[in-house]
Image: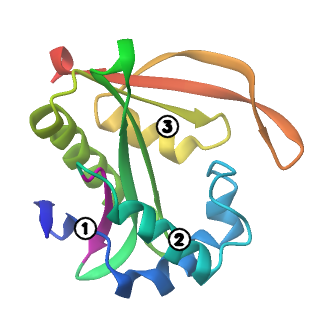
Amino acid sequence: MIIAQIKDVVLRELEESDLPKLAEYANNEKVSVNLRDAFPSPYTIEDARGFLKMVEKQNPKTVFAIEYEGNYVGNISLSVGDDVYRNSAEIGYFIGEPFWNKGITTKAVNMMTDFGFNTLGVVRIHTGVFEFNKSSQRVLEKCGFEKEGVFKQAITKNGSMFNEIRYAKTIANV
């Protein structure tokens, strides 16, 4: 099922046929270095199957495949908060290295932000980016997210500590 489309980029439900490419792209060290440790490294086809099972249980669905020119290229998600954070969501995404620097992620983030505001009814979407991930910071800024601050030494990845750059966009900024 297609959720949204901007020209050659589509957000749709994740499918079994996406799993080999999901495993391939997530297993790339240049990708995994920017992902949380919940995405294991190395990333196997079994990890991808487990991820799909988790996604299939979601209600409402908030994890989607990113498709470019008819091919699976990555994932994007919104995690809606609970309790006092129930009107906020955290966005997360990745695409395979062969598809970097083509504007795909910018389109996907714009579509997912619209989905969050218009379908899920959240009023704030936020994320944290590893300080060395300049490409993701540029994507968020192009999509109208504002830098809210730096969480110093907030991330431990591969045995090293890094700052986290926090970004957010509110429905008032749309």
Q: How would you rate the neighbour count of disc 3 (Cα within 10 Å): few for under 14, some for 14-19, many for 20 or more?
A: many
From the image, which quarter does the N terminus lie in? Answer: bottom left
Could you tell me if the residues under marks 3 and 2 are in contact, i.e. CB atoms within 8 Å? Answer: no
The label on residue 50 is: 2
Q: Secondary structure at mark 1?
A: loop
Q: Which residues are magenta?
A: 61-68
**Residue 84 part of the magenta segment:** no
Disc 1 from disc 3: Cα separation: 26 Å
Most frequent secondary structure within the magenta stretch: strand
The label on residue 137 is: 3
**Hey, what amino acid is under mark 2?**
Gly
Left or right, 99 with reference to 4: right
Which one is earlier in the sequence, the residue at label 1 or at label 3?
A: 1
Q: Secondary structure at mark 2?
A: helix
Residue shown at 37% from the left, 17% from the top: 83
Disc 3 from disc 2: Cα separation: 29 Å
From the image, which quarter does the C terminus lie in? Answer: top left
Task: Return the residue nearer the eye: 106 or 151.
Answer: 151
**Residue bearing mark 1:** 13
Q: Is residue 79 above or below residue 18?
A: above
Left or right, 107 with reference to 99: left
Residue shown at 52% from the left, 47% from the top: 135
Please name which of the two marks, 2 or 1, marks the residue nearer to the observer: 2
Please name which of the two marks, 1 or 3, marks the residue nearer to the observer: 1
Residue shown at 24% from the left, 46% from the top: 112
x and y percent of residue 125 in the render?
Answer: 33, 28
Residue shown at 26% from the left, 53% from the top: 61
**Residue 62 part of the magenta segment:** yes
Q: How would you rate the neighbour count of disc 2 (Cα within 10 Å): few for under 14, some for 14-19, many for 20 or more?
A: few
Disc 2 from disc 1: Cα separation: 15 Å
x and y percent of residue 10 in the render?
Answer: 20, 66
